[in-house]
Image (cartoon, rainbow, N blue to C red):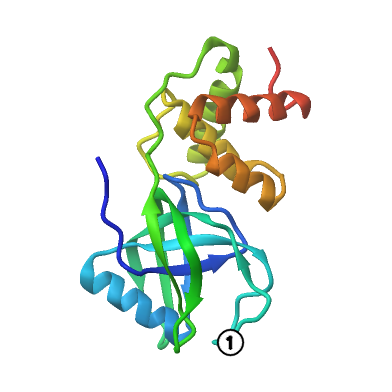
Amino acid sequence: MDVALPDPLPLFPLQTVLFPGALLGLKVFETRYLDMVSECLRLQQPFGVVCLRQGTESGTAAKGVQLESVGVLAHIEDVDAQQAGILRLRCIGGRRFRIQGTARQQDNGLWVAQAQPLPADTLRMPGPAVLATVNALGEAIRKLQAQDQTPFAPPYRLDDAGWVANRWCELLPVSLAAKQKLMELDDPVIRLSLVDGFLRDKKVVVG
């Protein structure tokens, strides 16, 4: 099912790659982003998270900034406003999107763009060849739960190749450019296969 995106879509450039289904914590204090959050909450709409390819995104007149063309929608799940002028957000990654044309800054410095939603991952079962990688993620989740840590949003879909691949992609110690390419892959089975190969090369999983 297709989804309608805000037009234009407000963007939050970050030096990170958000994956569908990932938890994202944000500390928001700049006026442009406080206003964006207020508008998103009022309209019950997401904003877009895009990775910074070049430059530093700060202030209302950022220069030399290049954004990746594919990002992920961030849906606000919880807002903490305990400190005056500071919001702490708990978001979860939704659908991927592709920026159409060029992102631009509004007068208040907020980045916006026209964007087209991309298809969600097709539900595919992990194959026997990547079973060790699936089991390793399940074991990592159990250990973290035993320590009262919840780095991933439930439900834990270990029978879904895309979900397993995305959770490993969050953990992998690879460059942002590599994570971006993994996130952009349309085939979740290929994404998981690449993750499996990396983990085997690093001896994280065997068998």
Q: Residues within 10 Å of mark 1 (few under 14, many from 20)?
A: some
- Tell me which residue sits at (54%, 10%) in the image: 128
Left or right, 189 with reference to 195 = left
Three-letter code, disc 1? Ala
For the point 63% across and 67% down, which residue is it?
Answer: 66
Q: Position of residue 76 (x, y in %)?
A: 34, 62
Q: Is residue 21 left or right of residue 140?
A: left
Q: Is residue 5 above or below residue 141?
A: below
In percent of width and height, residue 201 lies at: 77, 26
Q: Which quarter shows the C terminus?
A: top right
Q: Nearer the viewer, residue 99 or 168?
A: 99
Residue 19 vs 165, above or below: the answer is: below
Quarter of the N terminus within the rendering: top left
Residue 46 is drawn in which quadrant? bottom left
- Percent coordinates x, y for residue 186 in the rendering: 49, 35
Nearest the viewer among 74 and 91 is: 74
Q: Going 77% across and 29% down the picture, which residue do you hit?
A: 202
The location of residue 42, given as percent across then percent down, is: 22, 73
Residue nearer the viewer, 32 or 132? 32
The residue singled out by tag 1 in the image is: 61
